[in-house]
Amino acid sequence: MSIACPPGKYGWNCNVECKCKQGTSARCDEKTGTCDDGCDVDRYGPHCLFACPDYLYGDGCMNQCHCYNSSEICDRRSGVCRSGCAAGWVGKSCDKKCVEGKYGIGCANICSNCFNSSCHHETGKCLLGCKSGYKGEFCNQECTDYMYGKDCNFRCGKCAGGKPCDTKTGECPFGCAPGYSYDDRMCITECPTMLYGQDCRKRCGYCKDGPTCHHETGVCKTGCKLGYHGDMCLLQCNDHFYGEECSNRCGSCKNNGTCDKASGNCLYGCSDGFIGADCRTAIVRSPEKSVTAGIAAGVGAFTGVIIIVIIIILILRIRRRNKMSVSKSYMDEVKEDGFIQNERCELLADSRIETLQKEIEDNNKNEEMAEPIYANLNGRKQSSPVKLEDLHAYIVKNKENNCDGFRKEFEELPMGLLALCEVARRPENKAKNRYGNIVAYDHSRVVLEPLLNEPYSDYVNASFMDGYNKPKAFVASQGPNKMMIRDFWRMVWQQRVSKIVMLTNLVEACKKKCEQYWPDDGTMKYGDVTVRIVDTAKYTDFIIRTFEISKDDNSRIVKQFHFCTWSDHGAPTYPTTLLAFRRKVQSFNPESTAPILCHCSAGIGRTGTYIGLHYLLDQAMAEGQVDVLQAAHNMRSNRVNMIQTCEQYIFVYDALLEAIKAKDTTIPKSSFRAAFEEMSQNENGNETSLEKQYEIVQLLSPTIDRSECSAALMEENLGKNRFRNVLPVNRSRPFLYTPVDGCNDYINAVFLSSYTQKDRFIVTQMPLPNTVADFWRMIYDYNSDAIVMLNEFDRNDKSCALYWPEEYGYTEEHGPLSVELLSSSDVDPDVTLRIFKLSHMGKGEERAVKQFMFKSWPDYKMLPNSVTSLLRLHRQVTDWYKQNGKGPVTIHCMNGASKSGILVATSLILERLELDLEVDVYQAVKQIRINRPQFIESFEQYQFLYQMVLEYLDSQE
């Protein structure tokens, strides 16, 4: 027989005190402690156990104080502030926000220049950016000259006389500069074909490739049509001259007449003794044959002697140069970062080159070398083209026997300095080089415009690199050291760079790899160039920073794309993230013809890998084949040791395979529905595009070697794995450190990143009876305050542990940790919510942990009962995380893969959709499979993710 608790008590043995609104004498529910009339002032929670923080007031502590004096505690019941209301709030209880368009103390200020008059009600910062003609967080700065539009993000067109345009509309008030059309009044459209000059009124001359000339000057870009000359190709050839640039003289035309200006054909026939259209062929009569033959033989013999003499001279010169080709000093000393730290800049140093051919005597053997020599390329394999359809098989074959094929191919590349670098080795430039033997060659270096009174200021350790059919498409640079920062920004300005690709961190393995050359906030001046940071967007593996740089009243927008997860000398674990990063780089300002500036630390390994990948993807599109060896050879002829290690060389092949097989999988939000419908069409019984995409996912997903799961396979940990085929890799498992008797640091779980945040999720299996303590240690150690349970709980399954107490007031202890159930509710038909109090008894710490138990996914089914129910679960978890999340969200299903992968992929896909307005299911799945290849185990689950996006978009309309 149960005994009723006295007023103010509840729980087992009535030992828990009620905290209801009426006071301790009021009754609460004897079992749950729930107060029917709510909590007393200063208390909140389902059982009124939690004390209100100082900044909350009212019933259930649901309202937030907004006092002018931030240290003031408002009235607990009414919220009234003695000091008045904080900026952005009005009303008796300071609980009403300023109306749209106003902000500040008493809402007295107007969001004057904000777009749609929308600003933050407290600070006045413009939420949607600025009206046209204004910029800055508060839109209180007018656009500088030559910038216009919303947030001053647009550069003026070519206005007449170099005048600035209207800062609001972008229109040029006094017309356009020569070469631009005034039709749109913004002077951004070049003159149409055949026209040039002021107001596009002049017609191009007779240009070589049709009537196309430079839109400003009228100069024919590729030269003149046959029969014309001059910069503008308006001048016809003079009499007796014809052809390209009128450089050919007419033949023997009749009566000394002229010829056709284009072809050189004589218009009225030939003079006596000549035939042919151009009258250049002399008629040879029979009696003269022997004389002619004798003359020809004599001329031929003389010519032969001359040719032989020339060949002998060339051979002697080449052999003399070979003699000078190997530098012994290059191998003197190897220091940090694997680079040879020799201050001398020698030619053709190659640690692998074999003994050259024996030298021969030369009369001029002491003559000084006057040009670069490439002798140590002789005998090396220069090219290894692979057709795209053969690429996968080629990679598989060359990865056999510990990548023996690729290692031999990589060894065909020349090592060390291969060309003159006289400017780099000047004493005045020594301090500008981060590493003594990694410098810019004379023939390919970026030459800066010298500064006044600084005669050696034209040197910077950076080299031009060609793209595919595009000269100087890249600049490969070392990471700036302190001496180089000013020159780095000079180079950015001079080359009109709009994209900087940074592939190193500032410090790696406790070594400085690059100086920070940008301000964290505000503005900083480097020499004559002022740099202001405008925006910073952080993603899981990279950061995109937007700068406004200015000089002499001109300004430009430059974006820095900073890839943060690529270690020196190594390669990314898998290509997916770097390919996604490259697409971000490509999508910004695609019309720019300026070089992309790439740097890592030395500017050769990671930089060479990135540039080589870019070049080869363009080659693949144009030729249907790739030649990695030739591309690396070409790059090394312009900068030392580009693609520095064999690991990086192999990575280029892997990245090419994924990019070529998968193609561009990103879909803009606006066209997703049409794209999904097209991908789902099945014509003539063939596979759909969606099925083919999933097959590529399967083909290119990583396989985990047993050695990568060595901790999971240790004897003492085997019993902690529910299934032997779903194991955590060492690099991504959480290590446990709260001590509990009989437990070590292992749990079968992996970290996963979201679209913008590293290690946002922990995915694990349903706890076994012997891993419950480890489960709660993980929750505590990594400060996880959300648990998502996707599997059903079967009490008859003895392998499944109920890891929480079922009754209120009870606690379960695991070493120093205790878990208490505070509340349980079914606010959603498909989700049960529980709140636990997780305490560390030794430290006196208490935390609230919320569990979302999803009930709409039977274990025997591959997919949840509905897309809608999963989207609601995702929204609930996301909302909780935004409000309370301090650590990762923990997700578990029975094996830690079958269901968990769907929810994690959903989160990645929707986060990207909301942030960047684009969808990439393929990339999301590839990313989560890096740490757990068993995710998304069927085409049905892959297709479900596309259907989920469609449902989500429908719900937003």
Image: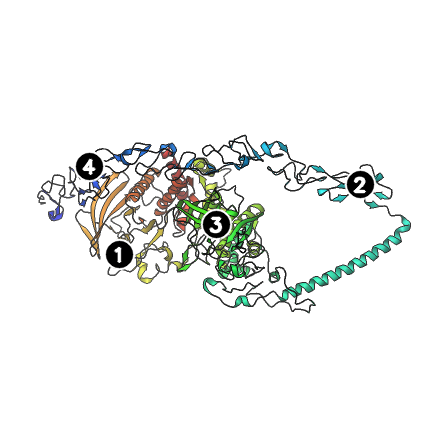
Q: CA distance from mark 1 to mark 3?
A: 59 Å
Looking at the picture, does residue 645 appear above or below residue 36? Answer: below
Of tags 1 and 3, the one toward the viewer is 3
Q: Which residue is mark 2?
A: 277
Q: Helix, strand or loop at disc 3?
A: helix
For the view shown, which residue lies furthest in the top direction?
183
The reply to whether residue 97 is in sight is no
Along the horizontal axis of the image, is 234 left or right of 503?
Answer: right
Circles 1 and 3, Cβ within 8 Å, touching? The answer is no
Q: Which residue is mark 3?
A: 489
**Residue plotted at (65% across, 69% down):** 358
Mark number displayed over residue 859: none
Q: CA distance from mark 3 to mark 4?
A: 54 Å
What kind of residue is marked 1? Asn
The numbered mark, 1 or 3, whose residue comes first in the sequence reads 3
Q: Which residue is mark 4?
A: 80
The reply to whether residue 521 is in sight is yes
Q: Helix, strand or loop at disc 2?
A: loop
- Badge 2: residue crowd in 10 Å (few <14, some 14–19, many ≥20): some
The numbered mark, 2 or 4, whose residue comes first in the sequence reads 4
Q: Nearer the viewer, residue 1 or 633?
A: 633
What kind of residue is marked 2? Ala
Along the horizontal axis of the image, is 174 left or right of 804?
Answer: right
Q: CA distance from mark 1 to mark 2?
A: 99 Å
Q: CA distance from mark 2 to mark 4?
A: 105 Å
Q: Which residue is mark 1?
A: 770
Quarter of the image where one finds residue 25: top left
What kind of residue is marked 3? Trp
Circles 2 and 3, Cβ within 8 Å, touching? The answer is no
From the top left corner, tell me how far across and down residue 699 is, in percent: 46, 50
